Image (spheres, rainbow, N blue to C red):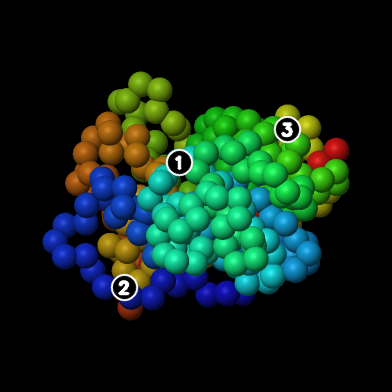
């Protein structure tokens, strides 16, 4: 299993401007994104991702999963509409020539092997681009009420772009008793309660992923569980990493940044080790579905 303890990073000068999209995107890419590396590895190994794979990554963020698939020889396309700053980092990782090179262009990347597209799956359609063999939705569902609604829509747009029988991978949080981070995520619910309509934490259910697949017209075809511990160099790194997920945005809007920082740090104390690092064991579940 790939270790996920984050290495010590250079601190930002002065207070961390987490309200700034660029700073948050860097926190995501440098601290939090790697926590699901064991999951990416398990899925790519099981599906034998390699030189013959054409992959569409939904909600690709800053592109770590795409980079791992590309390193196995896959042709990858990433699409995201939530964070231009994260997409800029994905382009730096995957496209030649630095930021903005070939941004979203059908032929971007060496040998047309990588594309990063801002928008929806429909925006990835381009002349001469074959159907996808694999669609991934690696952002876990099952910790916020209603967090699967948008995923169903994305899958409905992506499925027609994949060949018949193509694999579609969905990911969800495991049961709370096996996810130490669940207790920290509850802080977001507690602080966001005064904000009408704020997203609420809820425990993952066993059939969450199957229900999403059914609603999207997909056929379940196997599943698995992967241990993905969240490890951080210190409490500050843990707070920054967790807040970069966006799951605490409603709490920040309802209270303030300092209050959220304080309460998240307090919730992390049970997971603080003697050497100052933070370690939270978690289990994630993935479902492999097939287009029909």
Q: Which residue is mark 1?
A: 82
Q: Which residue is mark 2?
A: 9
Graded by Cα atoms within 10 Å as few (under 14), some (14 to 19) or many (20 or more), the crowding at tag 3 reads some
Where is the N terminus found, in terms of image quarters?
Answer: bottom right
Q: CA distance from mark 3 to mark 1?
A: 21 Å
Whether residue 78 is situated above or below residue 97 in the rendered picture = above
Q: State left or right for residue 288 relative to residue 171.
A: right
Of 28 and 202, which appears nearest the observer? 28
Is residue 101 in sight in this rendering?
Answer: yes
Q: Which residue is mark 3?
A: 216
The structure residue drawn at horizontal position 63% and vertical position 72%, both measured from the top left corner, is: 71
How far across and down, in percent of the image, does residue 205 sit?
Answer: 64, 39
Of 139 and 57, which appears nearest the observer? 57
How far across and down, in percent of the image, does residue 275 sit?
Answer: 33, 78
**View extreme (left): residue:** 14
Where is the C terminus found, in terms of image quarters?
Answer: top right
Whether residue 251 is situated above or below residue 43 in the rendered picture = above
């Amino acid at each position: 299993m790939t270790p996920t303890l984050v290495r010590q990073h250079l601190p930002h000068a002065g207070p961390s401007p987490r309200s700034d999209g660029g700073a948050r995107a860097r926190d995501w890419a440098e601290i939090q994104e790697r926590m699901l590396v064991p999951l990416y590895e398990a899925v790519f190994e099981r599906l034998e991702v390699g030189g013959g794979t054409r992959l569409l990554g939904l909600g690709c963020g800053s592109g770590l999963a795409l980079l791992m698939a590309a390193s196995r020889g896959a042709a990858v396309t990433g699409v995201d509409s939530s964070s231009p700053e994260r997409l800029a980092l994905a382009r730096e990782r995957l496209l030649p020539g630095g930021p903005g090179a070939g941004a979203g262009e059908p032929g971007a990347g060496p040998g047309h092997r990588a594309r990063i597209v801002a928008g929806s799956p429909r925006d990835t359609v381009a002349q001469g681009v074959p159907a996808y063999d694999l669609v991934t939705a690696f952002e876990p569902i099952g910790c916020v009420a209603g967090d699967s609604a948008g995923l169903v829509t994305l899958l409905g747009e992506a499925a027609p772009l994949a060949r018949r029988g193509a694999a579609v991978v969905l990911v969800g949080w495991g049961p709370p008793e096996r996810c130490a981070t669940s207790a920290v995520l509850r802080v977001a619910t507690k602080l966001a309660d005064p904000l009408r309509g704020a997203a609420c934490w809820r425990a993952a259910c066993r059939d969450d992923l199957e229900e999403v697949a059914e609603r999207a017209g997909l056929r379940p075809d196997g599943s698995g569980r992967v241990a993905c511990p969240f490890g951080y160099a210190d409490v500050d790194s843990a707070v920054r990493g967790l807040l970069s997920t966006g799951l605490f945005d409603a709490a920040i809007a309802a209270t303030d940044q300092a209050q959220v920082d304080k309460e998240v740090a307090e919730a992390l104390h049970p997971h603080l080790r003697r050497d100052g690092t933070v370690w939270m064991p978690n289990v994630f579940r993935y479902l492999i579905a097939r287009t029909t």
